[in-house]
Image (cartoon, rainbow, N blue to C red):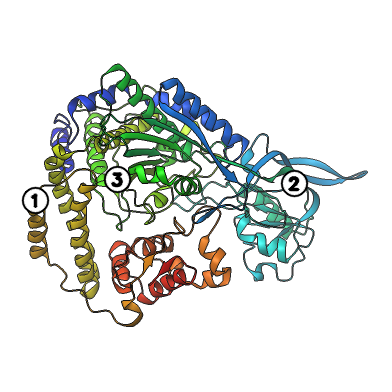
């Protein structure tokens, strides 16, 4: 029975563990597999996770200097820490730079009546021991005040009949969500939040998790917020219901100030004079609170290990220099990438593909599912098919190994697990720097390696002990192999690549047919039209790296035509009328997605009330929320698509969406100068 099962599993994944790897030369696979070390990556992770890495902070700088020092010791080229102003004023495309923020100390005490007044009895929070207990962007204060429970604290009803002026408010929401109401309108002296972690199947199960908190980076009225565990908050709530007075003393020495964004950059020079100016980049995000092990010391340490591996193998002569150059970047999440690509358009123009790693090491305790996520449907790219193919190879090898069969490459670290990886090939979802790279301003195809869910994300349990070095090693191999293949992709590889593309097309077509059967009617027809257009663009995407011959183009076109004839091409797109027939073009500035990090371009330029009234950013479709729809609505604008065709493209990617929502959103972007007719 066991032998039958192993045979079935290998068939399901498309190859046996003894077959040569697809696309990559066997000598390259062997060299990378032998040199990459998940244990080495985890040692760097343990160092990085010790720093409280808020953007533009002293802790972030310490982590950046560690990364740069390691890169220099590994022998990489052009290692530098690029600096850009963090002043709360400078605009970089769609990102307003946020001021630096640092904390020196912060304590929260509960007081009790004593013989000579109120005295400290219980220390609730201390920044020195748990930096996560102080919300980011808190300002200095010394406050003694009573605690008032206002529930979520996010609506006027939460404050009705409650006097919070000069008091501390206990809220279940993130501090930033209640700041304007609680402090600006109702005069609260500070915020105590027990916000729950991001929702997963394990949401709310652990009342002792401490969540990372945020305040508004641009608020004009100084305020502070402490984060407490739900178990502590629930105890207070019961005492308040019983009529007890809870008096707290908060002392904070922290604040925003003018500083600099620090972005670590390094390069491995390409060896082909005709291609070396092009760069394939490995990216992550270095910022996050202490400990921030999986999010995202894991991605930072893994691309550091990839850089070490490439540098060593090239220096020894085991691998030649890649045809294209390899770039390695460690910016703050989303905002740092937006700033870099705007401030350094020369670098942005050189980047032809990206491998982005954000959370790649979650062990069994985190309940993580490892994903290889595609670029958005607005940016079809063969880079994603390469990444999925490499991931399938690792799946095959590790599944065979875990099942007791022979495997040439089990990809296991000395201190790590032996479970099968079972990487999941996923469609586009936003949430990390890939939304900047793939934005229509830059159009850099990106393979995004990430864990989701992770039940400890953004909490004090995101610690190195929960990181599996085997997982780091496997993520490193998938990323390194994908990047190496793309960096060396020339016309000599296109036949094999077209065959891989053809296989992946069949898988995507099967998925399209399943969705279409559930939708039916006009929606299914629009889905089919979009699908075949996407597949034709996938073929064309090879041309970014290597030219296709007329015979290759003809063969690929015939394969797509035969499939569309067999399964239906969706017919002719209906004629658009009125506002649905409008065609938009994106202006050259500003560059970047509309909602970045700590700043929203639409809110700032349209106004909060008008921005909040837009339906599309809040819409929930079949497989995405409003963030995805809003990101892609802008990305699909290309000077030829009508509003109707953009709506149909969004519906094909994420599920049906009302036309009027798309019309309204694009008109709003036109009104603030992002688009023109």
Q: Tell me where residue 479 appears, x and y as whole percent.
A: 32, 36
Judged from the image, the secondary structure of the residue bearing numbered disc 2 is: loop
Identify which residue is drawn at 10% across, 47% down: 549
Comparing labels 2 and 3, the label whose residue is closer to the camera: 2
Q: Quadrant of residue 267?
A: top left
- Extreme right residue here? 116
Determine crowd level at label 1: few under 14, some 14-19, many 20+ residues with C-alpha closer than 10 A.
few
Identify which residue is drawn at 32% across, 19% down: 315
Comparing labels 1 and 3, the label whose residue is closer to the camera: 1
Q: Which residue carries the number 2 mark?
A: 140
Q: Tell me where residue 35 appears, x and y as whole percent.
A: 31, 22
Q: Which residue carries the number 1 mark?
A: 550
Report the Cα–Cα distance between label 2 and label 3. 45 Å
Judging depth in this view, the residue of 220 and 547 nearest the camera is 547
Q: Tell me where residue 116 appears, x and y as whole percent.
A: 93, 44
Q: Which residue carries the number 3 mark?
A: 424
Judged from the image, the secondary structure of the residue bearing numbered disc 3 is: strand
Reading the chain from its start, which is encountered first: label 1 or label 3?
A: 3
Q: Do the residues labelled 1 and 3 touch (CB within 8 Å)?
A: no
Report the Cα–Cα distance between label 1 and label 2. 67 Å
**On-image quarter of the C terminus:** bottom left
Report the Cα–Cα distance between label 1 and label 3. 35 Å
Determine crowd level at label 2: few under 14, some 14-19, many 20+ residues with C-alpha closer than 10 A.
many
Reading the chain from its start, which is encountered first: label 1 or label 2?
A: 2
Judged from the image, the secondary structure of the residue bearing numbered disc 1 is: helix
Reading the chain from its start, which is encountered first: label 2 or label 3?
A: 2
Vertical side of 84 occupied by 621: above or below: below
Vertical side of 374 occupied by 43: above or below: above
Identify which residue is drawn at 52% across, 31% down: 48
């Amino acid at each position: 029975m066991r032998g039958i099962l192993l045979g079935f599993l290998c068939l399901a994944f498309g190859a046996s563990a003894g077959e040569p790897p697809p696309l990559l030369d066997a000598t390259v696979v062997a060299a990378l597999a032998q040199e990459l070390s998940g244990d080495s990556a985890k040692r760097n992770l343990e160092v990085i996770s010790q720093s409280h890495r808020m953007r533009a902070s002293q802790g972030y700088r310490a982590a950046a200097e560690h990364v740069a020092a390691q890169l220099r010791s590994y022998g990489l080229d052009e290692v530098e820490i690029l600096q850009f102003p963090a002043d709360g004023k400078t605009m970089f495309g769609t990102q307003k730079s946020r001021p630096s923020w640092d904390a020196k100390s912060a304590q929260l005490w509960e007081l009790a009546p004593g013989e000579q007044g109120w005295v400290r009895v219980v220390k609730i929070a201390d920044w020195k021991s748990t930096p996560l207990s102080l919300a980011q962007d808190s300002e200095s204060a010394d406050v003694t005040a009573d605690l008032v429970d206002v529930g979520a604290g996010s609506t006027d009803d939460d404050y009705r009949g409650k006097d919070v002026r000069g008091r501390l408010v206990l809220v279940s929401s993130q501090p930033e969500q209640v700041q304007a109401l609680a402090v600006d309108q109702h005069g609260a002296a500070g915020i105590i939040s027990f916000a729950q972690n991001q929702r997963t199947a394990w949401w709310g199960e652990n009342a002792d998790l401490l969540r990372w908190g945020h305040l508004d980076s641009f608020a004009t009225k100084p305020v502070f917020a402490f984060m407490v565990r739900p178990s502590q908050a629930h105890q207070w709530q019961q005492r308040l219901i019983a009529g007890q007075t809870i008096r707290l003393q908060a002392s904070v020495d922290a604040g925003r100030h003018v500083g600099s964004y620090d972005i670590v950059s390094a390069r491995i020079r390409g060896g082909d004079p005709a291609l070396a100016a092009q760069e394939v980049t490995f990216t992550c995000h270095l910022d996050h609170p202490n400990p921030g092990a999986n999010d995202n010391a894991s991605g930072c340490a893994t691309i550091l290990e990839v850089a070490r591996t490439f540098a060593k193998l090239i220096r020894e002569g085991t691998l030649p220099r890649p045809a294209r150059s390899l770039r390695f970047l460690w910016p703050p999440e989303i905002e740092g990438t937006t700033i870099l690509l705007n401030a350094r358009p020369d670098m942005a123009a050189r980047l032809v593909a990206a491998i982005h790693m954000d959370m790649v090491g979650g062990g069994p305790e985190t309940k993580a599912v490892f994903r290889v996520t595609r670029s958005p449907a607005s940016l079809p790219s063969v880079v994603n098919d390469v990444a999925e193919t490499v991931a399938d190879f690792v799946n095959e090898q590790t599944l065979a190994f875990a099942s007791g069969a022979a495997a040439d490459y089990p990809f296991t670290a000395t201190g790590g697990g032996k479970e099968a990886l079972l990487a999941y090939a996923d469609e586009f979802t936003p949430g990390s720097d890939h939304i900047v790279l793939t934005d229509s301003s830059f159009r850099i195809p990106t393979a995004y390696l990430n864990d989701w869910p992770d039940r400890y994300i953004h909490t004090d349990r995101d610690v190195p002990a929960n990181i599996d070095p085997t997982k780091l090693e496997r993520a490193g191999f998938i990323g390194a192999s994908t990047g190496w293949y793309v960096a060396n992709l020339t016309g000599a590889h296109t036949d094999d690549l077209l065959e891989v593309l053809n296989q992946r097309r069949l898988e995507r077509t099967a998925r399209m047919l399943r969705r279409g059967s559930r939708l039916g009617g006009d929606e299914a027809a629009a889905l089919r039209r979009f699908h075949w257009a996407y597949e034709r663009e996938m073929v064309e995407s090879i041309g970014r790296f290597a030219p296709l011959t007329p015979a290759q183009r003809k063969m690929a076109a015939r394969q797509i035509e035969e499939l569309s004839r067999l399964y239906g091409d969706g017919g002719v797109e209906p004629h658009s009328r009125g506002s649905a027939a409008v065609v938009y073009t994106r202006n050259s500035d500003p560059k970047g997605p509309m909602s970045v990090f700590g700043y929203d371009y639409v809110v700032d330029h349209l106004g909060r009330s008008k921005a909040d009234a837009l339906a599309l950013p809040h819409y929930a479709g079949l497989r995405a929320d409003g963030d995805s729809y809003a990101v892609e609505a802008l990305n699909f604008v290309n000077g030829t698509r009508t509003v109707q065709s953009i709506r149909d493209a969004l519906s094909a990617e994420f599920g049906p969406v009302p036309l009027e929502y798309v019309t309204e959103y694009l008109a709003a972007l036109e009104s603030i100068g992002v688009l023109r007719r």
